[in-house]
Image (spheres, grey):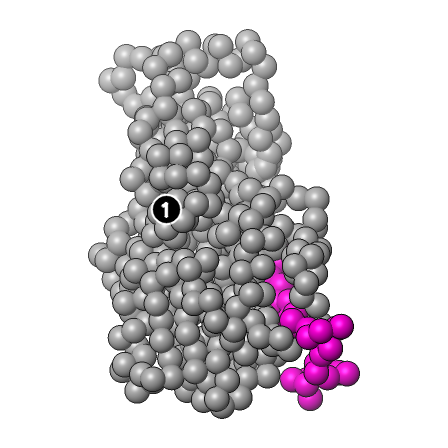
């Protein structure tokens, strides 16, 4: 990535402070030059009137205030950029804040950063003022750093998980209705064609899960991490299943209960505000976990999968649907932006780790598939919804939070497209004594 002129001789505004400013220290353009190398893919403008980069660039990055520059200097990388962008101290022109996908592509592929020499760094700091090394308070959308979260309990304790879930999911049900669409489904959809609507693809996902679990009327389903009850309501409405969902989000549970009553599913569908560890200790015919594994912590996989196994009757089926790393050697913890602004304490493992942990608790994996390209399509659709309803969403949750979501979803789309992360569905069974299983010789949901 680079912030210097893309072409030799490309026009650039002189990097000088506005008239009347007596301070002749480094300009924003000087700082950018010190931190980058190679050709510039975007236009950079500073609050001091300095600029550099091609005047005809399709995308302009504007550093609007001294605070914005200090964010960038005191937290280099994604976190500093996020702080400046979420606070409005850094702006992108040429893309919509609800879907900055094209800007992220350009910055990722073409902007080249470098670490200045010690002498360069000292000269910049002296010129700018040593106070620039004091980080400003982060935007209110930012969660505490990991080491401070101990005030909410140990990592992945019930209390701390509840706080982390609330940070992400209790934003605003009205906001989620606009972004997620009528299904209120915040997990990867399944597209039979890229031309499918989001609603068609989410219905196809729920049908795929139901068919893998061999759901039929009269069966009992437990859906852990049920969100707004999409799977619970679909299983009850379309398959006549008695379905129970549990979620740690109070806002989700309230919305789901109202939807169940509105759709006339009372008696078949139910959603409770519960930790998955506190779900009824009964044996269900099937268990689904759609988007919960990312929140339980990799070290807790044995406890998590054992809890699901214990709630599954012999010969029952478990479907685990979750985001994974692309390989088993990648770090489990997320980067600073995701951890502070999106999923505090979230962790991902490779698909092999998931399969191994399922087998280690005595379940047998019968089928696995990767839906990562489907998630890229899903995120693109959510971004389109956010763009379409931008004014409403800003009025509902504030501009900073809306910017977080646009940045997060566009960045995640790019990560799925480039195989940085994946989405795996793993189907497993709890066999009877001596390995007895009625699972068919070939999958019974395939044509």
Task: Tell me: 166 left or right of 35.
Answer: left
Which residue is most to the left?
A: 395
Question: Where residue 42 appears, x then y in whole percent?
Answer: 50, 41
Residue pointed to by mark 1: 159
Name the residue: 41% across, 74% down. Answer: 244
Secondary structure state at the residue bearing disc 1: helix
User: Which region of the structure is painted magenta?
Assistant: 421-447
Question: Where residue 71 appears, x then y in whole percent?
Answer: 39, 29
Based on the picture, tell me whether residue 249 belongs to the magenta stretch.
no
Question: Where residue 385 appears, x then y in whole percent?
Answer: 38, 66
Name the residue: 58% across, 14% down. Answer: 117
Can you say which quadrant of the picture contains the N terminus?
A: top right
Of residues 194 and 22, the one nearer the viewer is 194
Snapshot quadrant of residue 111: top right
Task: Tell me: 255 left or right of 295.
Answer: left
Task: Tell me: 210 left or right of 71.
Answer: right
- Name above or below for residue 422 compared with residue 77: below
Name the residue: 31% across, 37% down. Answer: 139
Can you say which quadrant of the picture contains the C terminus?
A: bottom right
Question: Where residue 391 appears, x then y in whole percent?
Answer: 26, 60
Task: Tell me: 37 left or right of 91.
Answer: right
Of residues 318 and 54, the one nearer the viewer is 318
């Amino acid at each position: 990535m680079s912030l210097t002129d893309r072409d030799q001789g490309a026009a650039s505004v002189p990097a000088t402070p506005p008239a009347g400013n007596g301070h002749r220290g480094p300009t924003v353009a000087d700082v950018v030059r010190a931190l980058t190398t190679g050709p510039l893919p975007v236009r950079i403008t500073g609050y001091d009137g300095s600029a550099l980069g091609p005047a005809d660039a399709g995308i302009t990055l504007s550093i609007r205030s001294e605070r914005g520059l200090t964010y960038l200097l005191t937290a280099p990388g994604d976190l500093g950029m996020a702080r400046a962008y979420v606070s409005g101290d850094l702006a992108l022109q040429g893309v919509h804040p609800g879907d900055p996908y094209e800007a992220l592509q350009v910055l990722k592929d073409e902007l080249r950063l470098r670490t200045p020499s010690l002498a360069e760094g000292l000269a910049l700091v002296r010129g700018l003022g040593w106070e620039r090394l004091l980080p400003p308070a982060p935007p209110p959308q930012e969660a505490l750093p990991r080491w401070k979260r101990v005030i909410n309990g140990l990592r992945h304790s019930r209390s701390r998980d509840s706080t982390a879930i609330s940070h992400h999911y209790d934003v605003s049900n009205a906001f989620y209705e606009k972004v997620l669409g009528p299904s209120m489904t915040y997990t990867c959809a399944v597209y039979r064609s890229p031309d499918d609507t989001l609603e068609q693809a989410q219905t196809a996902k729920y049908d795929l899960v139901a068919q893998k679990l061999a759901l039929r009327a009269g069966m009992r389903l437990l859906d852990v991490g049920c969100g707004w009850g999409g799977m619970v309501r679909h299983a009850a409405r379309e398959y006549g299943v008695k379905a129970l969902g549990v979620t740690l989000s109070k806002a989700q549970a309230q919305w789901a209960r109202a939807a169940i009553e509105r759709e006339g599913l009372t008696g078949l569908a139910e959603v409770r505000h519960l930790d998955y560890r506190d779900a009824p200790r009964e044996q269900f015919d099937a268990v689904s976990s759609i988007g919960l594994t990312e929140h339980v912590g990799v070290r807790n996989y044995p406890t998590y999968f054992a809890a699901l196994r214990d709630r599954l009757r012999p010969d029952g089926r478990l479907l685990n649907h979750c985001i994974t790393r692309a390989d088993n050697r990648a770090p489990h913890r997320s980067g600073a932006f995701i951890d502070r602004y999106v999923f505090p304490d979230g962790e991902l493992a490779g698909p092999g780790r998931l399969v191994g942990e399922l087998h280690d608790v005595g379940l047998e994996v019968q089928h696995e598939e990767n839906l990562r390209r489907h998630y890229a399509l899903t995120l693109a659709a959510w971004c389109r919804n956010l763009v379409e309803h931008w004014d409403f969403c800003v009025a509902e949750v504030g501009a900073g939070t809306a910017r977080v979501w646009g940045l997060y979803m566009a960045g995640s789309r790019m990560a799925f497209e480039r195989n940085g992360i994946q989405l795996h569905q793993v189907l497993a069974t709890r066999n009877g004594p001596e390995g007895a299983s009625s699972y068919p010789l070939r999958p019974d949901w395939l044509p």
